[in-house]
Amino acid sequence: MDDWFDHLVKDVIWQGLQDWSGDLKTKSSGAIHDELKKLKPGDTLSGSPLVAVIAKSESDDTVTLLIRGRFRVFGGSVAPFMRLQVVVSRKVDKSLDPPITITAWQTVVGDLAIKKDGVFTAELAFGWDQGAWLGRGAFKVLPPGFGLDLLLGGLDERGLMVGIDTDLPSPIPLGNGMVLTGVGGEFAYNFIPRLNKGQWQATPWNATDYVAWAKDDEDAGPDRWVQGAPELSAVGIGLHADFGDLPTMGWLLKLQPIGLAVLTPGPVFILGGKGTLLNAGDAIKLQGYVAVDIPSSSMALGLDFHGLEPEKGDFKFLDVHGSLDGFFSFDRPADWYLRLGTRTSPVSAKVLKGLDADLFLMVGHGAMPSPDGGNDVGVFMGLGIAYGEEWKVSIVYVVAKIGARAALGVGWDPLEVGGSFGIYGELGLKVWGLGLKVVLQAALTGHLPQPTKLTGDAGWHLDLPWPLPDPSGTVRYSLGESTGPPDLESPLLIGSQT
């Protein structure tokens, strides 16, 4: 591998190691080696680009890392998406910068998009992945709209994965209120989906993994597939098409693409695709899939939606996004769930610049937070709403915000009830950076029967100009058992202290 690329990848790995273990620059070679020996499959060192451990070897003192994300090269003017799998020695050489050595390159895959507004879009990719060749060439001419996308998802001495997509230069009426705007398909022999983005996973695969694979836009490059085990004799077939409504020729409604895939052995069925409403501005986008995995006796649903009006420009009347997920297992019926948003990632909306809201509804397995920090079977819902504005004219700055949040949970295995309510307010005025801002907030949380507890707090904070200290105070009270109740607050306190 060329020196400049080797150095680029090692810099990313070294930064990931520092994110995971702290500052390693000041440590000795032996101390760094000891830190690297702690790495185990499943560890994620950093998220962007992703650096994760997928294997380790004690015999030659190495770890195998997956590096996945965008790499800025040539001064940052180009940022291709890349997937790398490399073997790194845990032996450290402080004379090197960074002091690590890549002993083997197992996978090198790159994907680069090029476009010229109003003229064409193109995507080029090529790579080698553990004995299989990969490639992709996509080209679309604008404004006629004709396009061709050829994908070589894998080619080795045992099999291949190929895909083709075409965008038609003009829609074809189907006579049922819809028009056909494109067709495509995939065929795989002895290649299977690369689940969990190639990362190590301790639990067996189920239908949720195939939904995540289908939804992953970032993983749409040539490395979505991996060689199957020789004894599998795997076959995969997918057919899909692009549709639009006939009256507006796809302006009001566009499904692009939507289709069905069948994977064997298994079998595994995946149905779904993407859709757009009000296509002129891409105001409402949907992406959803249903997967049925026969080997794990499970079904899963995954739907993401994002509404943006208008799409372009700084002014936004509405910005809403969220998700709907579901799961059912015939082998483990108690593990079913349905989630409209989650407490950590709720359905959220912003109207104009001042009104914010979020909500979530979780039902079934893992919905109800339990006192021990886990999750029990039940129903858990939450709502947050706030209004706030900031004004700055010349040297004058004014801020005013108010918000409230509430959450309620009912568990039935075991039986438990919990809830919370909180309010928040902020008011401030500054001139030339001098002035006053006061923040008030209060919250009340309860849980029963175990632990039976009611807790609350009320606080205030004054933001004074420098060098004056910022006084603050909090009053807390508790009734019942000392064991803390679960966190039942809405995950988003809109208008929080910023």
Image (cartoon, helix red, strand yellow):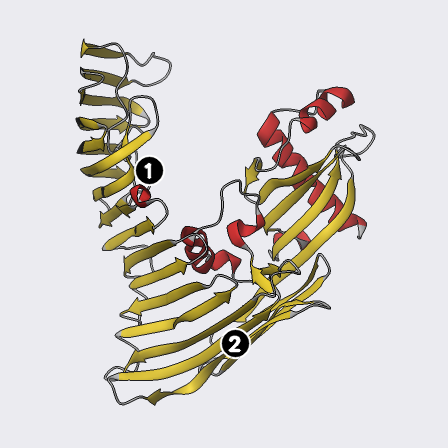
Residue 441 position, x and y percent, is 20, 22
Residue type at tag 2: Phe
Residue type at tag 1: Thr
Does residue 400 appear left or right of residue 235 in this picture? left
- Asked whether the viewer can see residue 39, the reply is yes
Q: Secondary structure at mark 1?
A: loop
Q: Quadrant of residue 249?
A: bottom left
Q: Quadrant of residue 277?
A: bottom left
Residue 216 position, x and y percent, is 46, 56
At x 29%, y 18%, the residue is 464
Q: Is residue 42 above or below residue 123?
A: above
- Residue 344: which disc? 1
Residue 299 position, x and y percent, is 36, 55
Does residue 308 appear left or right of residue 32 in this picture? left
Q: Is residue 394 above or below residue 25?
A: below
- Asked whether the viewer can see residue 281, the reply is no
At x 36%, y 66%, the residue is 274
Mark 2 nearby-residue class (10 Å; few <14, some 14–19, many ≥20): some
> Tag 2 or tag 1, which sits nearer the N-term?
2
Question: Which residue, as the protein is rendered here, is positioned at the far right?
Answer: 95
Q: Of residues 52 and 351, which is closer to you in this image?
A: 52
Mark 1 nearby-residue class (10 Å; few <14, some 14–19, many ≥20): few
Q: Secondary structure at mark 2?
A: strand
Residue 3 position, x and y percent, is 80, 48
Q: Is there CB contact under 8 Å for labels 1 and 2?
A: no
Which residue is tagged 2? Answer: 120
Q: Of residues 213 and 118, which is closer to you in this image?
A: 213
- Residue 68: which disc? none
Does residue 10 appear left or right of residue 254 in this picture? right
Quadrant occupied by the C terminus: top left
Per the model, the C-alpha gap separating discs 1 and 2 is 40 Å
